[in-house]
Amino acid sequence: MIFAGIEALRLGEVFGGARRRIILYAPPYGNFAANESVRQGLETALSRCGGTSLMACCLPLLSDDAWTREVMGLLRPQAGVEVIEKELAASRHFLHELQSLFGDRVELIEMPFRPSLPALIVDDSVYFGHFAHSPVLTPDGFWCVADVPVEALFAMARTGRVPEKTAREERAAFRIIAECAQALERGKRLDAKTVA
């Protein structure tokens, strides 16, 4: 399914209904932090007994990687360096709060490479958008949803197998899963001290 704007995805409800996993691959997360419904949905899922885990990929700080400035220039074309630094700090602060509240259910990973798209994975659904050189920002762009066997596709990505005899939708979704799997495997793990 295709949606115009991320708000149409109703992420607060989506996150709140998660039973196994939430993977955030769409930094920075300042908009999530400012959205009470999204924040509450994440907290609901993470507080459920025996429930959901959260893996969140964040951008390196501006001083740590040259490509972060390029990505943020694409995501926030009108923002100056000071505004970008504040947004990256607010994003990390939000993730740190979740990690402080929910401990080992929340794993924070610094992206090891420039992301090619924003993606969110909730159980067996993949939500993905696109980047564009435009004054209309990513949240207001098109967002798509695909229901696929996420665990099986992650297993293939981890072992280096490419799905050959699967549905076209699964093969297409594998491209997104493979990028996320590489980031999760190669990214730097951040603890509460590193995030703050």
Image: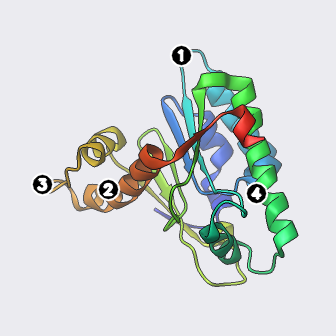
Q: In the depicted view, which residue is nearer to us: 134 or 5?
A: 134
Q: Mark 1 points at which residue?
A: 50
Instruction: Indicate left or right for 134 with 164 as reference.
Output: right
How far across and down, in percent of the image, does residue 50 sit? Answer: 53, 16
On the question of residue 37 being in view, the answer is no
Q: Is mark 2 on a helix, strand or loop?
A: helix
Give SS at disc 4: helix
Indicate which label's residue lies in the foreground, 2 or 4.
Answer: 4
Q: Residue at x 35, y 54 (%)?
A: 178
Q: Which quadrant of the figure has residue 141?
A: bottom right
**Label 2 is placed on what type of residue?**
Phe
Sequence-wise, which precedes: disc 3 or disc 4? 4
Q: Earlier in the sequence, mark 3 or mark 1?
A: 1
Q: How far apart are marks 2 and 1 (CA)?
A: 28 Å
Q: Mark 3 points at which residue?
A: 165
Label 4 Cα neighbours within 10 Å, binned few <14 / some 14-19 / many ≥20 = many
Report which residue position mark 4 lands on: 88
Single out the mark in the foreground, 3 or 4: 4
Q: How far apart, in angstroms, are the residues tagged by discs 3 and 4?
A: 41 Å
Q: N-terminal of the two: label 2 or label 4? A: 4
Q: Distance between the residues labelled 3 and 1?
A: 34 Å
Residue pictured at 86% horizontal, 67% vertical:
83
